[in-house]
Amino acid sequence: MTRRRCRRRDVGVRVVGVVMAMGLALTSAVAAPELSAQATESVLAERRLEYRAARDAWEAARSAFSVVERQFSAALEQVGRARRSGDDDALEDAFALAQDRSVPYRAQEARVEDARERLDEARQALINVITVRLGELLAQLDEASSAAERAQLDARWQDLRNEQQELETQDGDDDLQVMPVILPEITFDPRDGPDELEAKAQILERLAAVADTVVENLDQERETLTTRLRIERQRQDFLAGTDRFDDIRVPVVTNPASGERPAAADSTMASRPLTLEERLEALERYREQLVSYRDQLLIRARQFRERVRRMP
Amino acid sequence: MRARGVVRAVGLAVMVASILLLGSDQAAGQSHMRDLVITLGGSVESYSGNFSAVTVPVVDSTDEATAAVGEVGVRGLLALVENGRRAVELSFDGGLRQAAALGFTVRDYAPREWAGSATLRYEETLGEWGRLTSRLGYRGRAVRDRPPMPLFLQPGYSTVTGGLGLVTRSFDGVSFDLQVEGEEADYRALEFLPELNLLDRRSVGLQAGVRWGMASTVRFFSGVRWSEYPEQGSFDPTDPFRRDHTVNVGFEWTWFGDRIFAQAGLEGTLNRSNSNRPEYDALSFQALFNTPLPWEMSLNVRTVITGKSYVRETEFPLLVPGEEADNASIAYLQLTRPLAANLDGAVRFGWTRAETDIGDAYYDRFGGSVQFNYRPSFF
């Protein structure tokens, strides 16, 4: 869904970029070349600033995400430890902690995706302006009055071309794709040999195994909640069936109190108690997130093993 | 009569269709249908007794009757607003029950019942202090070809209720609740049966409760209710219409386990009036039990037993026979099992008995039914 929205937004950005480039090209055709170049340089400087700001925002979002992710993975490790120790109370606490920490994890993940979309827009806008400026430089090269001026313009053209290529390369950079951060402390280090890489892959796989444990626990909880919901609904059906046609009202008290029974109060009233249906929905969302995280861990581990295989 | 039935059917269909449309996410933003159940069922009932009811239009000399009954119903819960702090819900329930009654001396009857109710409920969390709820409800029923006793069917009526409730957070494990409720009931008297108007009433009630416990909770409650019966005389020329003051005290124990739900309660009622005739003391026991069984089955049991004693001995003509028995017992047992995805099948047995000291009259009903509850998956 997000990827589709991204692509749609990319198309929009490209259309706007093309329109803007056409506008700039038209301006440069009718205005004096020096004035047009100044205007384009000014827009270029502005787009560069916007791009840098978008990049900074994206990196800040990634940093914040990495902190939350580290806390989430620490909670998962706590689940693993509690499971190994066989302490049921500690395991329950660890499951609850992991679920609590999954909420900011999800919010930060959305923030990173949002920042990534803005970065894409800013990059595309910068590429468009560079394209226009490159065209202008080519025209200026043709009209250059001296070899020195031509060399200067050529160097400028080359710099801008390199910048454009670099920006275009970043567009397909794997490092900027959907899940930008998985345990930033476990990264590829050029000094790593096969043993170190294998060890890092094993750490990731161990964490994935813990995530699997939590998923299994969630599956059990889901089954329990589903059963409870089924029984609860059957009870409601039973009560509705006896109440619907007044079969439960008999000619004893002519004015039976029909007030509903107040639901039990919660010890913390800051929010409305969740219904069974809402609890099931929340559990499903958490499970999906956890499965996705586990898959990312396994992909990352596979990437480490790939590197080991490619080593001479 | 048939035209009115058709109008009712169309009205019900329009109401259900509107609710279904409102329930779709596209049509109503964040509102969604939380539950929708369509019920089909059939039952066989047997009735016996010599209990009389002044509000039943015809009489028959038989003491025994049977009926084959078919019913269809729909109910649901539409969440209009639902967030962490507040919720607005509309619950609705409607149904049609058609019986073919046999065993009467004069003729056979084919009573048809229409019943419907809707409640709009608003709930808001008051910071860390508690929760406030308010509700407005309508309940109505209509009966065509109402048979004589012993096949007792509640007469047609419509009631409007409104209420306001407050439940506090728990203070050291104890929470408090307070409810105020008003009700107006209008019984549909036919031209040749003005006695039904005797049951018209208006009432206002107040109830306070205290509760403690988590999985196992106990709630003590007490309340008072003021009722007026504008069509019933008090036989007091200075205060001609019946006015009752009712005080009730009771407790309720609830067990909400992972698998078992159990609830039992005892409630005492003291009813005093400006008329000597309806002054009584009553004691009522209610129990509800629900547990899963093997093969995905579940067992549901519901029991209500009420005993009543009039403060003053009165003669037959002064009471409203059939609407004021001395004791009554009701028991329902149901076994439910999923038959397919979103489809449950249930077998239900029900028993009712009511007795009065006047002429040792009694009313007995026993029935067995099969029901199918379908929850459409498109919500």
Image (tube, rainbow, N blue to C red):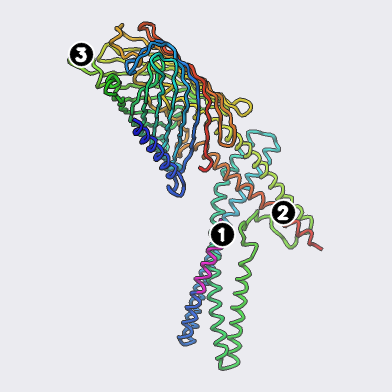
Nearest the eye: A67 or B61: B61
Badge nearest the viewer, 1 or 2: 1
Chain at tag 2:
A
Q: Position of residue A47 (x, y in %)?
A: 51, 72
> From which residue to which does the magenta span run?
A1-18
Farthest residue toward the right?
A: A312
Badge nearest the viewer, 2 or 3: 3
Check if residue A15 falls in the magenta segment.
yes
Farthest residue toward the left?
A: B238
Q: Which mark is residue B236?
A: 3
Residue under circle 1? Answer: A4
Residue A43, compared with residue B210, is above or below; it is below
Secondary structure state at the residue bearing disc 3:
loop
Residue under circle 2? Answer: A301
Task: Please identify the quadrant where the N terminus of chain B is shown.
Answer: top left
Identified by mark 3, the residue type is Asp
